[in-house]
Image: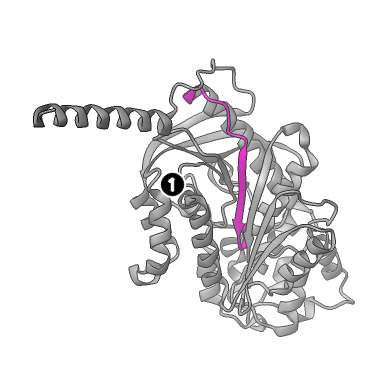
Amino acid sequence: MNDKDATSGFFYKAMMLFAILLTISCESDEEHLEPLPYQVLVGIQATTTITFEEGLQGLMDQGNMTEEEIAPYRKKLDMASMRTRRYDAHVVTYHTTDPNGHPVVASGVVYYPKTGKPRGVIEAVSLNKTKYECPSKQLANFSLMQGMAGFIVIVSDMIGAGATDDMVFPYYYHDNAAKVCADLRLAATELVRNVYGRSMPAWTLISGYSLAASEAWALARYYHKHPELGVNVNQVWIGGGAYQPIDVLDHQLRTLTAEYVSAPSVYYSVNHYDSLGLDLREMFRGELREHYEEWCTGNMALADVSQKLGPDISQYMNLDFFKDDNEDYLRLRASIERFTIPNDWVPTCDVHIYHGRNDTYVPIACSDKLVAYLRSVGTAVDYVVTETGHLENGLTMASDLAELLYK
């Protein structure tokens, strides 16, 4: 064989190999499902393309992080994103209900990888409870980064943002949060069929951190309690969550310290949705007493509220309100106590729980209690305790998850 023939043969084999690999990776002809009328999905409001670089920049912007701070985690994220660096981001509206069971049209985002067959689904509960930073308004966000390894990512604005911007955020209404997220998955299933001609992959991972951790845990429980939905959850990743919100309240009242000022917004929410009729001006003091309608309704980021008020609870809360002889306080407490997610189910999926030993936002006891229950019923739980604070622990969980998804 002469050099020309050898070169021609090599080129032919290379092209054949490339075609085979392309067929394996894309699998574009596997399904061609016919469109069906929408049942849960109301409509697709907008569609745009989001890149890995935009998602990473969005993560840095939202976390006020520098390149130096993101460097230890960037390699894992970069490796994960090698599978898919571009996504279709569909802003959708869909039917669901509010905490009192009233029908509403909510919004969220369905991210679909532009290359190849999706490897599975990630239902990421957004930790952002600020109206102007909800997923549909900040498409390049933390939730997207989790799926940049070729997964469909589904993330709701939740009640109180996006299409329900005129409503109050329902903090810790876990059952409602679970339904709002599950309904978005139903809407996403209709979108994937009608836009891409595919069925929704069965492989599902649920994730959530901080305020979203307990909502993600509630979503996993919801699917367990509703097998008729046919959702196969095989992994749950949660961290830094207040799975027992009453424990957070007691911890803050005992220490008179809250580095992350979420409690006033929680009280505002509970007073609204449980119709407690409390005069919040009797509960708050100082600047908060004058501005709680603005600061506790999602119009200001909780991080900004925390910076404005400081960690000393006595400076903005009327401690006389939180006494056992105050009937208003006891009614508020009763509402918060029922937000604990019931230990009435035994997960059959892999469970990963993260918490920082030096977490000053949510006491580690919240995760300790959940893990103790899971182990008592024989659930294999991967409990990662870092020697860090709340934010650093969240980055550890995110990078570990990215490394798993790359495999």
Instruction: Identify the coloring.
Output: one colour
Residue at x 83% of width, y 51% of height: 345
Q: Per the image, is 302 magenta?
A: no
* Residue 65 locus on image (x, y percent): 40, 68
- Assess disc 1: are there few (<14), some (14-19) or many (≥20) residues with their C-alpha within 10 Å of its C-alpha: many
1 over 160 or under it: above or below: above
Q: Does residue 32 appear to the left or right of 2 in the view shown? A: right
Residue at x 31% of width, y 32% of height: 18
Element at label 1: loop
Q: Considering depth in this image, is 214 or 238 the residue closer to the camera?
A: 238
User: Where does the N terminus fall, quadrant-wise?
Assistant: top left
Residue at x 52% of width, y 34% of height: 92
Q: Does residue 395 appear to the left or right of 100 in the view shown? A: left
State the residue position of label 1: 139
What is the magenta range?
195-212
Q: Considering depth in this image, is 266 or 231 the residue closer to the camera?
A: 231
Question: Would you say residue 342 is visible in this rendering?
Answer: yes
Q: Does residue 150 appear to the left or right of 176 in the view shown? A: left
Q: Per the image, is 207 magenta?
A: yes
143 over 254 or under it: above or below: above
Q: Which residue ends up furthest to the front in the rendered image?
A: 1
Residue at x 77% of width, y 43% of height: 224
Question: Would you say residue 300 is visible in this rendering?
Answer: no
* Residue 386 locus on image (x, y percent): 59, 74
